[in-house]
Every structure is written in structure tokens, then in C-alpha cells.
Image (cartoon, coloured by chain):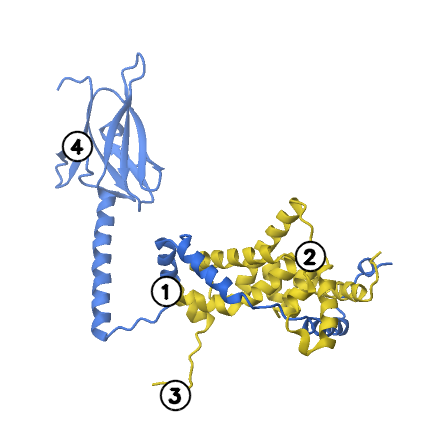
């Protein structure tokens, strides 16, 4: 039976230590590799690095710079300034974000079924933070349960509604709250201090 | 001011950081420090000085390009060795593909300075010859563990072989090398 077939015993620490000691002794007896031309070879390597365009890309250098941990020293005044800057950025972003919930409502006429009198109208609202959006208007008697919108992508909510030609007032209910002035191209007063949007489906004589 | 005779030695870590900051000259510190061990390993793995020099040069070029991705938690010597092993394996495959004969290194080319230790040199030359006859994975392990002195964990990382399997391979390598040195032909 060959040693390979017999198989060594990896859990036999004593045998492993003996084997390591023996192999280490053999390695120590090896003649040194001549280094007489090492200087020339090293020079060639460094020359190749410079000549063959081996330089790292600026992106790689930037990544290396970003990954490198470093100590940052700030004065108390600097910390205050930094905090103020962060707070300002947060305020601006928060304001922008909150506005995004309320603006961007729109509609578009999608298609006209052949031989039908109704148009399919798509209502869209950009409300990335919303959990629920409902469409209310003349067409559903302002029923906040009748026409929910579905998420489309990360920001938009949509619903397609078949409407006969005519003029309709509408608005969106976002997370249970009626939005005033939802950003449609036409708006009208709701008589209560707020504003509704208006959609006109073609074919009606105003 | 530094004391007379004091020569600051740049650590691997410092040299790498300087290269990463754009100081390419700092790379020469790493080439100086590791060229010898890389060439020694490549020579014994490939048995061809020209191939070995080519592989070592390619290894340092690749290491230079990849330094941006170098993880400072790794030991540079082991990280460099991983590149070198891959280049050696590729070169060995290419050599086999082209039917290049694997001629053991001329003993004289490796033992230039053996005149002062004649007894040791003869024994060393025999070991050198026996190593070239080991199977590549055994030769690789012998060189990494007992010549370059990498830990089992580092060898496991650079070769992709588990620590337990490496320890088993150490025992087999010992058996095989003993047999070679006794002039026995493996059945």
C-alpha cells in the first residue's frame, strides 16, 4: 500500500510536528538562489512600471484614497460649522422631499376605445413617501375608497380611469389627507379655501 | 534630528500607502524587499530562469496595478505570493501546452557560493533536485511553508486549499521527498 493510499493522519499532531521539522531542515539545506543580477532585474521591473503605462487609473487612486482610514482633527468652531452645514443640507433636502409629495400630479389621455364614448385617462402622482394614494373627484362622487392608485416604480402612483368626455374636478388623498393643489395643469377653488385640479376629456362643448 | 547611523526603514504598510497616494517610487522598497523571495519561488516552481524572471516581473506589475484594491488587513508578502502563484501556474500550464521540457535547474546555476560549505552544498543540490521532481502542488506547499515560511492560514488563502488538507499534504510531501532522496522510485 502506498503512503498516499494509506493516508496520513492529520489529527496526529506529533507526526505533523516531526514532518514539519524534517522538511524545515531540508529547506534550510537548500543552496541559495544566486542574486548576482537582481539589481538589473529590479531596475527592469521599475522601468516597466513607468514605461508600460502601468500607472493606476485616477479612479483607482481615488478609491484607494477614500478607503484609507485617516485621522480628522477639528476645532470646536469647526465642529459647530460642520453641524450647521449638515443641518442646512438636511433642511433643504427635507423641504425638497416634502414638496415632492405634493407636486407632480398629472394626467394624460391614453387611448380611445374603438367605437366607445369613453377615454382612458391616466392619473399620476409623484409621492415617493406615501403609503396610500386615492383619487377622488366628480367621477366617483369624491368617494375616498373607490379609486386607489397603484405604485409605479419608486416614486409614482398611477391609475387608469375610463371617462366620458367632459370636465371633472379631482384631487388626491395621500395617506388619508386630501391634497390641495395637486399640480395638475388646471385648477379651481374647492370653495373651502383649497384648490382642486381639473381635467377636461375631449369631445365636450364648453 | 535623527541619531547618527540611524536609517529609517519604511514598513510595507507605509510603502503601500505612499504608492496609493501616488508616490510610485515607494514601490521600489517593496520590489527590493520581495524580489529575491519571488524569484527564488518562481525559479523552483518553473525550472526555467527566463520564465521565472518574466513571471516575477509580471507579478510586480500586476501588484502595482492592484494596490488600489489591497486590503491592509492582509500581509503584503502573502498577498503578493497569491499573485505570484497564479502567474506561476499559468506559466506552467503554458509550458506544458507547448510541450516545453521541464528541465531541472542546473545545480551550478543555483549554488554559486557553495565553495565555503562543500558538504552542505552536495546535500543541498540533492534536495534541490528532489524538489524539482515533486508534484507541483507538493513543491508549491514545500516552498510556501518551509522556504517562504507562510502560515497554514496564509497558504490556505493563497492556494485555495483548506488547512486540514494542507497538513495532510505536508505528511505526503515528507514521504515523497524522503523517497526521492533515497533514490526510490515511487510505485
Q: Nearer the viewer, mark 2 or mark 4?
A: 2
Q: Residue A74 vs residue B165: left or right? A: left
**Residue A204 drawn at (x, y percent):** 17, 18
Decide if residue B172 is on the left or right side of residue A32.
right
In the rendered structure, the residue with mark 3 lies on which chain? B
Residue beneath disc 4: A185
Chain letter for mark 4, please. A
**First along the sequence among labels 2 and 3:** 3
**Would you say residue B70 is visible in this rendering?**
no
Mark 4: give few (<14), some (14-19) or many (20+) Cα within 10 Å. few
For residue B106, side relative to residue A73 (left or right): right
Badge nearest the viewer, 3 or 4:
3
Q: Is residue B184 visible?
A: yes
Q: Are marks 2 and 3 in contact (CB under 8 Å)?
A: no
The residue that mark 2 highlights is B136
Q: Between tags 4 and 1, which lies in front?
A: 1
The label shown at residue B3 is 3
Q: Which residue position is annotated with label 1?
A: B23
User: Relative to B7, does residue B143 appear above or below in the rendering?
Assistant: above
Q: Residue furthest top?
A: A115
**Chain in blue?**
A
Q: Position of residue A92 (x, y in %)?
A: 21, 54
Instruction: Label the yellow chain with its letter.
Output: B
* Real-space CA distance between mark 3 and mark 4, rounded to the nearest whole angstrom: 80 Å
**Relative depth, front residue between A161 and B25:** B25
Label 2 with label 1: CB-CB less than 8 Å = no
Instruction: Please check whether the numbered discs 4 and 1 fall on a single chain.
Output: no
Amino acid at each position: 500500500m502506498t503512503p498516499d493510499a494509506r493516508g496520513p493522519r492529520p489529527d496526529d499532531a506529533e507526526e505533523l510536528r516531526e514532518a514539519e521539522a524534517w522538511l524545515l531542515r531540508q529547506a534550510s539545506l537548500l543552496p541559495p538562489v544566486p542574486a548576482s543580477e537582481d539589481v538589473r532585474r529590479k531596475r527592469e521591473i521599475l522601468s516597466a512600471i513607468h514605461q508600460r503605462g502601468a500607472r493606476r487609473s485616477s479612479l483607482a487612486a481615488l478609491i484607494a484614497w477614500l478607503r484609507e482610514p485617516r485621522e480628522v482633527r477639528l476645532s470646536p468652531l469647526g465642529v459647530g460649522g460642520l453641524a450647521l452645514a449638515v443641518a442646512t443640507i438636511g433642511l433643504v433636502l427635507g423641504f425638497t422631499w416634502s414638496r415632492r409629495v405634493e407636486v407632480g400630479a398629472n394626467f394624460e389621455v391614453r387611448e380611445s376605445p374603438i367605437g366607445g364614448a369613453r377615454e382612458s385617462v391616466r392619473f399620476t402622482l409623484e409621492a415617493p413617501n406615501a403609503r396610500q394614494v386615492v383619487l377622488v373627484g366628480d367621477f366617483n362622487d369624491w368617494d375616498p375608497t373607490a379609486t386607489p392608485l397603484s405604485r409605479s416604480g419608486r416614486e409614482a402612483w398611477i391609475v387608469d380611469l375610463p371617462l366620458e368626455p367632459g370636465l371633472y374636478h379631482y384631487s388626491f388623498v395621500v395617506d388619508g389627507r386630501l391634497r390641495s393643489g395637486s399640480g395638475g395643469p388646471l385648477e379651481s377653488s374647492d370653495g373651502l379655501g383649497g384648490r382642486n385640479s381639473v381635467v377636461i376629456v375631449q369631445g365636450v362643448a364648453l | 534630528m535623527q541619531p547618527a547611523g540611524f536609517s529609517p526603514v519604511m514598513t510595507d504598510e507605509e510603502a503601500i500607502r505612499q504608492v496609493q497616494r501616488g508616490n510610485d517610487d515607494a514601490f521600489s522598497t517593496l520590489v527590493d524587499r520581495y524580489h529575491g523571495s519571488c524569484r527564488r519561488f518562481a525559479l523552483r516552481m518553473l525550472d526555467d530562469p527566463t520564465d521565472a524572471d518574466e513571471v516575477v516581473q509580471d507579478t510586480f506589475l500586476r501588484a502595482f496595478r492592484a494596490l488600489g484594491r489591497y486590503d491592509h488587513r492582509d500581509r503584503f508578502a502573502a498577498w503578493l505570493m497569491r499573485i505570484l502563484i497564479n502567474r506561476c501556474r499559468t506559466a506552467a500550464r503554458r509550458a506544458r501546452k507547448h510541450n516545453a521540457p521541464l528541465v531541472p535547474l542546473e545545480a551550478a546555476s543555483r549554488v554559486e557560493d557553495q565553495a565555503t560549505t562543500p558538504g552542505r552544498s552536495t546535500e543541498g543540490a540533492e534536495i534541490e533536485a528532489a524538489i524539482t521532481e515533486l508534484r507541483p502542488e507538493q513543491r508549491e506547499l514545500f516552498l510556501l511553508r518551509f522556504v517562504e515560511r507562510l502560515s497554514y492560514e496564509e497558504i490556505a488563502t493563497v492556494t485555495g486549499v483548506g488547512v486540514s488538507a494542507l497538513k495532510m499534504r505536508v505528511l505526503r510531501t515528507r514521504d515523497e521527498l524522503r523517497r526521492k532522496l533515497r533514490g526510490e522510485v515511487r510505485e
